Image (cartoon, rainbow, N blue to C red):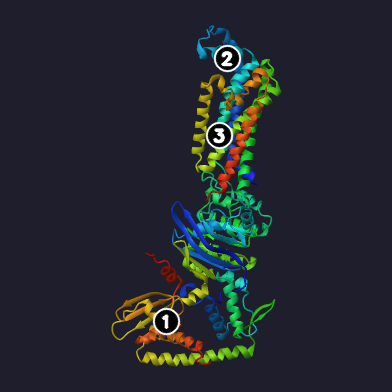
């Protein structure tokens, strides 16, 4: 019944995240209509500098539904909000003082590894649902505005979000084994996320090896190339941090 | 005397950031006994309990429960499968209801006693659908006790089980413990500040002070060993030191006017013999209460 | 409730229980052949350690005051044995009464009388150990 306890502890974060992302996904679809009306009104932008170039590129991409979905939903909203909820779901832990009953939990006949594994599994499953289900709403609802969106595209992008975002989940998870309260792992993980985002943006084309780049599935969008290496590295990073969490907890005194 | 040892601590030491919580603690608890664990605040009681249950790792020394090493991860699971625990904070899951937490806990113990569960729910009048957070201190303790007793455990480790309870509720907890031991043949290791509780239900005692066991053994033996011998003299009592008595276990000598009082922890015969050689007018032997034994044993050492 | 023990009095609880059983037999509250409460129910009722109850019962059996019948429980010993103990105690009561009366006549207070008895018992215990007095 550790699953049940983990669920009880994370369910509100999960349900709120689910609601928020579902609404945003729906919003994306209907936003497309609004954007389509606005685009012709945008004055022609001369490509002045990096920023100008990007703006022009964005406008071009968004003319198409597929491009719009990629830019607005996968690259922006789901990546950002998804990262936030990945961190939220990874924080707290079963044994921190914030969740209460730590000594009671430790008096149960389970190893600390089991405790952590269960909590991580539940959290990651929830995050996977957060990445996948709202994304599937897009191909589901696209016909209502006369568009179509490939389910395969949705699946692959959702997978990228999940694997990339799981790095942040694992980071928050690891930090929760070091800090006892709910807030510090959250703040530190989000902080690291922000720094990473800034670095990736500033790095320009070199940012193609960045984590957020993998999450957004840009290479798949542009050329259909699934970012296997990036996904593998992200998975390895997550696994490494989760393993480090079990080591951390194993040697800790309560 | 050939009872197997359910709990064995051998020279346990524990250091936390410079403070020495345990400094060579050694004691044993034989099967079927009820052992009272006394000590001042900060003496190391809770640390000891945490070491026994694998929540904290000792810096050195050995702790064995059921003959298994407490600091081994797998052995620890086996130990906890057979042990019922109540923490001093009665720390439970605030957000679960009473029924939920019972079902949750039961799922971990194949030997869970559903009959005892029903019995205690009735006896303690537990509000099954109230959230743990909303329970009074007494109710919380009762829930914690139920969760510990229904596991089919051979050993109960209770950290201050009656703290914060009114006398009636405390007596109820003690009676629950006693009837469980009588019916299920469990061993109990409980810490408390109430010496009267140890007097009442324990048959073994461990007194811990500054991380060491200063008194340990069968309660009747401990009580028999400590005696106060009062010598009255014609004139001023002689100024003798413990060394002059040439017998071991002289804990204290008080001199007041014509009266010399000797506290011995090693029986009284040798003291009485020595005492007679001082030519007192009278020799009185008085038993010492456990409270006095405790207070004498935990005097601050310089 | 027939018995009551005081854990903090300094006298070992099992001794208190033994004394109370004997007293109950003397006063006739328990007659030869009567069954004593079981160890478990008695421990629960008095909220005391079952091992202590068991010890008291064992000692009482050793002294011949009660009989432990395997599987059936504890019973007050039959006529002959019980009476011997009761008679000794009754005689003792007389001896003690006389001694106390005499000491009081000399102006010794009750508290001092009690101390004298305890000291004497402690001294006797020591002497018996060194093989001095026989019983």
Callout 3 and callout 2 share a chain: yes
Residue C51's spot in the image, x, y percent?
59, 72
Q: Residues within 10 Å of mark 3 (few under 14, many from 20)?
A: many
In the rendered structure, which disc, 3 or 2, sits on the residue that comes first in sequence?
Answer: 2
**Residue A95: x %, y % from top left:** 55, 46
Left or right for B300, reference B132: left
The picture quadrant where one finds residue B279 is: bottom left
**Residue A87, disc:** 3
- What's the chain of the residue with tag 2? A
Residue depicted at 63% across the width and 89% down the height: C79
Task: Give the spatial CA distance, label 1 vs label 3.
Answer: 71 Å
- Report how far apart the C-alphas of labels 2 and 1 lie in the structure: 99 Å
Q: In this rendering, is residue B216 above or below C26?
A: above
Between disc 1 and disc 3, the foreground one is 1
| Location of mark 2 (residue) | A58
The residue where tag 1 is placed is B271
- Element class at badge 2: helix
Nearest the eye: B242 or A163: B242
Element marked by disc 1:
helix
């Amino acid at each position: 019944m550790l699953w049940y306890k983990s669920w009880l502890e994370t369910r509100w974060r999960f349900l709120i995240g689910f609601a928020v992302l579902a609404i945003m996904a729906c919003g994306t679809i209907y936003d497309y209509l609004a954007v389509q009306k606005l685009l012709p009104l945008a004055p022609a932008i001369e490509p002045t500098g990096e920023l100008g170039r990007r703006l022009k590129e964005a406008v071009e991409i968004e003319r198409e539904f597929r491009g719009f979905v990629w830019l607005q939903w996968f690259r922006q909203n789901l990546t950002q909000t998804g990262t936030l909820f990945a961190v939220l779901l990874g924080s707290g832990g079963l044994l921190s003082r914030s969740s209460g009953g730590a000594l009671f939990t430790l008096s149960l006949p389970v190893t600390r590894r089991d405790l952590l594994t269960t909590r991580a599994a539940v959290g990651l499953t929830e995050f996977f649902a957060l990445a996948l289900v709202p994304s599937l709403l897009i191909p589901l609802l696209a016909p209502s505005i006369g568009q179509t969106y490939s389910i395969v595209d949705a699946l692959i992008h959702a997978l990228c979000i999940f694997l990339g975002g799981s790095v942040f989940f694992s980071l928050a998870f690891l930090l929760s084994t070091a800090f006892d309260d709910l807030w510090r792992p959250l703040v530190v993980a989000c902080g690291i996320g922000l720094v990473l985002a800034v670095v990736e943006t500033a790095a320009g084309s070199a940012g193609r090896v960045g984590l957020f780049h993998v999450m957004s599935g840009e290479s798949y969008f542009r050329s259909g190339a699934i970012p296997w290496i990036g996904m593998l590295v992200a998975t390895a990073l997550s696994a490494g941090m989760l393993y480090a969490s079990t080591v951390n907890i194993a040697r800790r005194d309560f | 005397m050939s009872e197997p040892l359910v709990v064995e601590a051998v020279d346990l030491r524990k250091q936390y950031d410079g403070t020495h919580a345990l400094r060579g603690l050694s004691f044993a608890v034989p099967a079927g006994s009820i052992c009272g664990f006394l000590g001042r605040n900060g003496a190391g009681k809770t640390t000891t309990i945490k070491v026994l249950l694998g929540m904290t790792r000792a810096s050195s020394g050995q702790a064995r429960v059921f003959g298994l090493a407490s600091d081994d991860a797998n052995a620890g699971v086996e130990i906890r499968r057979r042990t019922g625990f109540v923490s001093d904070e009665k720390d439970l899951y605030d957000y679960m209801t009473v029924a939920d937490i019972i079902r949750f806990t039961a799922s971990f113990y194949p030997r869970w006693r559903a009959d005892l569960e029903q019995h205690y729910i009735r006896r303690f009048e537990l509000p099954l659908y109230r959230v743990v957070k909303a329970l009074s201190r007494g109710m919380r303790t009762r829930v914690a006790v139920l969760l510990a007793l229904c596991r089919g455990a051979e050993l109960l480790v209770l950290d201050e089980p009656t703290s914060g309870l009114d006398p009636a509720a405390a007596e109820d907890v003690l009676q629950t413990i006693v009837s469980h031991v009588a019916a299920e043949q469990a061993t109990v290791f409980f810490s408390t500040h109430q010496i009267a509780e140890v007097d009442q239900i324990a048959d073994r005692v461990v007194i811990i002070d500054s991380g060491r066991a200063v008194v340990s053994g069968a309660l009747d033996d401990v009580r028999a060993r400590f005696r106060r011998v009062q010598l009255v003299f014609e004139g001023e009592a002689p100024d003798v030191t413990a060394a002059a008595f040439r017998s071991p276990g002289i804990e204290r000598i008080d001199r007041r006017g014509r009266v010399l009082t000797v506290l011995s922890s090693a029986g009284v015969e040798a003291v009485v013999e020595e005492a007679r050689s001082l030519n007192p007018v009278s020799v009185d032997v008085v038993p010492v209460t456990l409270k006095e034994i405790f207070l004498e044993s935990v005097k601050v050492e310089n | 409730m027939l018995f009551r023990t005081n854990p903090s009095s300094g006298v070992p609880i099992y001794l208190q229980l033994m004394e109370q059983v004997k007293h109950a037999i003397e006063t006739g509250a328990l007659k030869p052949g009567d069954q004593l409460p079981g160890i478990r129910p008695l421990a629960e009722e008095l909220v005391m350690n079952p091992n202590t109850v068991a010890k008291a019962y064992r000692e009482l059996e050793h002294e011949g005051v009660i009989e432990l019948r395997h599987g059936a429980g504890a019973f007050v010993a039959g006529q002959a044995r019980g009476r011997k103990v009761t008679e000794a105690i009754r005689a003792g009561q007389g001896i003690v009464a006389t001694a106390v009366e005499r000491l009081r006549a000399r102006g010794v207070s009750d508290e001092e009388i009690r101390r004298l008895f305890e000291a004497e018992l402690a001294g006797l215990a020591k002497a018996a150990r060194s093989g001095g007095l026989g019983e």
